[in-house]
Image: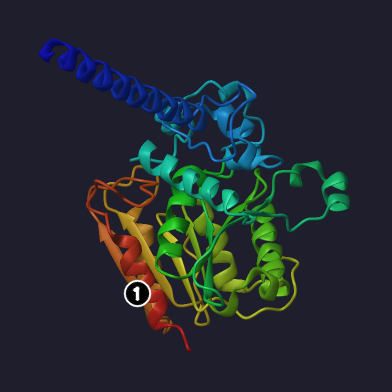
Amino acid sequence: MKAGLSLLLLTHLSFHLTCALKETNRSVLKNQVHESNLGNGTTEIKSHLTTSHTCRDIVDHPAFKGFGEALLVRDENSRYYNTTLGNIGTLMPYHSHVEPDIVVGAMNHMIDEVNDGKRIFYEFYNTEQKQKDPIKELTGLFFFRGKPRASFAIICPGGGFSYVGSLHEGFPLALEISNKGYNAFVIRYRLGSRQLATEDLALALEYIFKNAESLGVSTRDYSVWGGSAGARMVGNIALEGVSAYGASELPKPAGVVIAYTGQSSYSSDFSPAFITVAANDGIVDVNTVDRRVENLRNSGVDVEYQRFQTAGHGFGLGTGTDAEGWLDIAVQFWKRHMKE
């Protein structure tokens, strides 16, 4: 009798264990499909990227259909398609302290936005304009939403006008700004010259102003951010205004954020400026930055200057360096110059 009861209990336990294992296997399989390797034709739009994925996986990701190339650093990226996101820093030689996990985190935020039915990429040149000038093909704006009707920032990543370092110096910054409740755009501009890039920035600003209602952003107290080459674009707008570069007459930014650039221009009507650099910058002459800050202040411009020691050039968010946290200070500077 006891033996029969034990056998019955063992059979019952075995049945439930088998069911539990089957359910676990189904869950594992579901996650494997959800996080499947990209490029195999079965990837869901929800699938997140990892540092093991490649640049080709970005281009092929269904969430980025039609503009995947604009996420990458150059106009022609096929030779870098096999580079893993864990080694993405090798594609941005003018940048330092590139953290692959931070890069991937910002990309996965965009994937989640698309999965939630939100549009993340906007073209400020139309099809006809791109056909007439093919180097405009990859231009556009990546949108990181904050609170509805909040002010916006537009970020101009650097790269010496030979590449656009959005993966390190654009998307992660925009994500942090949007997490603080502000709207943030990252511009993909034309390569080759500061003039062309600044024209793109001016027309992108005009596009945002014209479409502010549908975008859900306020045009009051906007800011423009840039690093290195991108900071030269910002400096041009802060000095000369948007209309000097082919766009409509628009108000100058309420504040500009200028990171590690050797540009020296200044004037009395330059936008209020947050300026940052590291003393050990191997590309920028820090003395030039010091003099620009002094000249701006002497001209009556409000300037906040953060001079770090060991962060190097192109430090992005500065994670893991003595510049870590600089973005928070820059946002506070911007807020002080908001009128509303």
Q: Nearer the viewer, residue 256 or 221?
A: 221
Q: Is residue 82 left or right of residue 28?
A: right
Name the residue furthest top. 3
Q: Residue at x 66, y 30 (%)?
A: 76
- Quarter of the picture holding the N terminus: top left
Q: Which residue in the protein does label 1 denote?
A: 332
Kind of residue sitting beneath label 1: Gln
Nearest the eye: 41 or 287: 41
Q: Is residue 245 above or below residue 312?
A: below
Provide residue 315's location: percent of width, then percent of height: 35, 47
Q: Residue furthest front?
A: 1
Q: Residue at x 65, y 24 (%)?
A: 41
Q: Position of residue 50 (x, y in %)?
A: 43, 32
Q: In the rendered image, which quarter is residue 15 located in?
A: top left
User: Residue at image x 53%, y 54%?
Assistant: 230
Residue situated in front as seen by the camera: 283 or 74: 74
| Scheme of image coloration | rainbow
Dot 1, crowdedness within 10 Å: few (<14), some or many (≥20)?
A: few
Q: Nearer the viewer, residue 232 or 211?
A: 211
Residue 139 shown left or right of residue 46 in the figure = right
Locate residue 208, reporting x and y percent. Answer: 67, 69
Locate residue 252, reporting x and y percent: 58, 78
Up the image or down, 48 lies above or below 176; here it is: above
Q: Most extreme residue toward the left, as rendered?
A: 2
What SS does tag 1 mark?
Answer: helix
